[in-house]
Amino acid sequence: MRAALVLAAAAVVLTGCAKAEAPTATANPADAQAQQQVVKSPSAPAGGGCTIAQHGSPKFDLKSAVVGFSQSEKEANPFRIAETKSIKDEAAKLGIANLKVTNAQSQFSKQISDVQQLIAQGAQLLVIAPLNSDGWEPVLQQAAAKKVPIITIDRKINARHCADYVTFIGSDFTEQGRRAADQMIEALGGKGKVAILLGAPGNNVTTERTNGFKEQIAAKAPDIEITFEQTGEFTREKGQQVTEQLIQSNPDIDGIYAENDEMALGAVTALKGAGKKPGDVKIVSIDGTRGAVQGIVDGWIYAVIESNPRFGQLAFATAQKFLDGEPIPEKVIIEDREYDSANAKDSLGQAY
Amino acid sequence: MTLTETTRERAGTLFRQHGALVVLGVLVVAGTLAFDTFLTPANLTNIATASSFLAIIAIGMTFVIISGGIDLSVGSLFVLGGVLAAYGSQYGTLAALALPLAVCGLFGLVQGVIIARTGMAPFIVTLAGLLAARGLMLSLTGEGATTYLVEDETFAAIGQGSPAGIGYPVFVTVAVLAVAAVFLQRTGFGQNVYAIGGNEDAAALMGVPVSRTKIIVYLVSGLLAGLSGALNAARLSSGVTILGIGLELDVIAAVVIGGTLLTGGAGGLTGTIAGALLLGVIQNLINQAGGLTSAFQQVVSGAFLAAVVIVHRFLSRRAAP
C-alpha cells in the first residue's frame, strides 16, 4: 500500500511540470511596433537617478556580456509566455549571445537559488521578474559584492534604489486598478454589487490593483458596494472555483473585478456553468491577453485594462543607458492601453 | 536481515544505502566536465546552503518514515516557522528562535499524540496538520498579504553569515545530522524507531514503548521543520508567505531517494542528505544547461524517484516461498 503512495508522490512530482500553452503567433507584423512598451513617466530622468558611477558596476559591452534573466512563474499563462519571449527576442536582436534564462516555477526558494546560480555563473547584468517583493536579502548581498546591476520587471523588490537595484520597469498598478474601477462604474451605471477576485498575496501588484480600484470606487461611485473579496491567486482554475462559490453565496452580484485575465476567464467558465448569459454579470479585468480580448468580442467581458508584458526592448534599452552613464530613475512606468467593446475586435492582433 | 541473505538481497541493501551517494558523485563529475561554472566554490556553497533547509526537514522525516509513518505537515510548518520567526524577531533573537520551535514543536507533538493514541493513519492526521498550519500562517499574515521583516540583526546573521564562505545553515545541518545520527544509530530510542517501523505488533510484544516513540518522532519532525523555516526567514530577512507549497513531497522524495523504505524499518540519514543534495544538484545542472526549461527538473527528479523505487522493488524481492 505504501508503494502506491510512493507512486502517487512520484506522479505528483511528474505532473507538477507546467502544461505550457502554445504561444499564439503574432497576427500582423505591422502591429509589432505598436505592441512595444512605451514609457509613460518619467520622460526625462529626474534628478537623483542612479548612475553607473554611483552603483559601482564595471562598464561592459552588453553584446558580449553574460546576462541572466530569472522568470518567476510557470510559463502557463500568456503574460509570462509573452514576457519571456520578449526578453529572449530582444536579446537575440541585439546580438546578446550569452543570455541565461531560469524559471522558478512559482517556487520562491527556487528563484533565490536560480539567481544566486546566475551570479555564480558570472552574470554581469540581472533582469529579474520577482515572484515576491520581500525576501531577496541573499541575492542582494551577493549581487552587491560583485557589483552586478539588477533590473526588476513587472514586480518590485522591496530594497534600496541604486544600492540594491538599478530600476523597476513596470506598469502603474494603482492606476490600472483605478482605470478598471472607471470601467466598472460605467458598466454598472454607478450602482450595484461588485466582487473582487484578488491576485496572489504577498506582492505589490495585488495590493496596488486592489487599492486603486477601491479608492476610485469610493471616490466616484459610493453606490457601488464591494460585497465579496477572495484570492484567485492569478490562476484560471482558482478564479473559476472562487466564482462558483461566489455565485452560490451572492447570487445577486452585478460585477466582477478580476485582477488578471486568467481569473476573469475562469470566472467566465463559472458563469457559463451557472447558466448565466453574456453580460448578466459585468467583468472587468487587467492584462490584455488574447483570450480576454476575445471575451470582450464574445460579450462575456466588459473591458480589459492592459498590462504590457513586452519588457525586452525597454529593459535592454534601460540597461544600455545605464552602461552609457545616464542616470536611471527608481521606477520606469510604462503606458498601458485599454480594450472595450468599441476596439476589441480590431485590437485582437495586438493582444498577446 | 538473516544469515541466509542472498546476493540479490545484499546488492539491494547496498544500492539502497549508497545508491544516492553514487549517483550524486556521478552527477558532480558529469557537471564538472560539462560546465566550467559548476565546480566553483561559489556555486557549490550556493547548492549546499540552498539544500540545507530541505535537508534539515528531511532528517526529521527520515525518523518518521523509518518508524513506518509519514508527515505531510512539514511544508506548512516550514512556512509557519518562517513567519513566526520574522514576527518574533521584533522581540529579540531568542523569541525569533523560540516562537517557531515552540509552535511547530507543539504541532508535531499533537499530531504524534493523535497518531499514537488513536491509531489514526498518519497520512490523514498530518494532512489535517498541513491544512491547519497553513491556515494559521494565513491568518497571522492577513491571508499572506503581510510580510513581517526580520528586525533583529543577530538573528538575521544566523541565516546570512558565512564563515569561510560556507553559510551557517550548512553548519546547522551538519550539527543536526550529527546529533540525529547518534540518536538513530547508537541509542535505544533509535532501535525502537527501527523496530516499530519493521513490525509494530512484534515491537509492542517485545516491550518497545510504541506510543512514546511515535510521539517523539513526530515532535522531532515538527521541531526540525520549524527550525528550518526560522533559518530560512533569517536568510531572507523576512517571513515570506508563499513558501513551502508541496515542499513535503520534495522532502519525502529526498528521503526515499536516499534509500529509506517508505514501508518503514530500514533506512538511514547519510542517504537522506545525499538525496537532498541530489535534488539540489539536478536543479543546478538543469539551470547550467540553460536551454532546458526548468520543468525538466521535475521530470528528472520524478523519473529518478520512480527508478529508485523500481530498483528497490526488484532487488529486494524475496524468492517465492
Image (cartoon, helix red, strand yellow):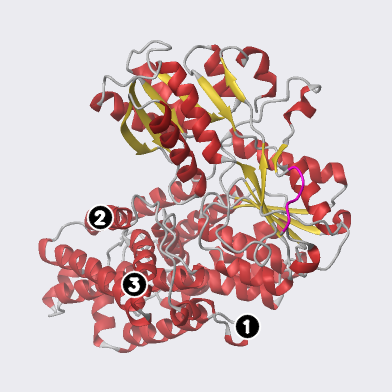
Picture residue at 30% right of the left edge, 58% below the top: B140
Q: Of residues A62 and B150, which is closer to you in this image? A: B150
Which three-letter amino acid code belongs to the residue tagged 2?
A: Ala
Picture residue at 56% right of the left edge, 23% below the top: A291
Q: Of residues B31 and A33, which is closer to you in this image? A: A33
Judged left or right of residue A322, residue B297 is left
Residue A177 placement (x, y as % from top left): 50, 34
Q: Secondary structure at mark 3?
A: helix
Q: Give residue B204's quadrant in the image.
A: bottom left
Residue A183 placement (x, y as % from top left): 49, 22
Q: Are marks 2 and 3 on the same chain?
A: yes
Span colored in magenta: A43-47
Closer to the chain start, of discs 2 and 3, is 3
Instruction: Pinpoint the chain carrying mark 3.
Output: B
The magenta stretch spans residue B18: no
Q: CA distance from mark 1 to mark 2?
A: 38 Å
Closer to the chain start, of discs 1 and 2, is 2
Can residue A245 be seen here? The reply is yes
| Residue B63 higher or lower than A345, as above or below | below
Main SS, magenta residues:
loop
Q: Give residue A32's quadrant in the image.
A: top right
Q: Secondary structure at mark 1?
A: helix
Q: CA distance from mark 2 to mark 3?
A: 20 Å
* Quadrant occupied by the C terminus of chain B: bottom left
Q: Are marks 1 and 3 on the same chain?
A: yes
Instruction: Pinpoint the chain carrying mark 2.
Output: B
Residue under label 2:
B132
Residue under label 3:
B88
Residue under label 1:
B165
Residue A88 placement (x, y as % from top left): 75, 44
Q: Of residues B302 and A148, which is closer to you in this image? A: A148
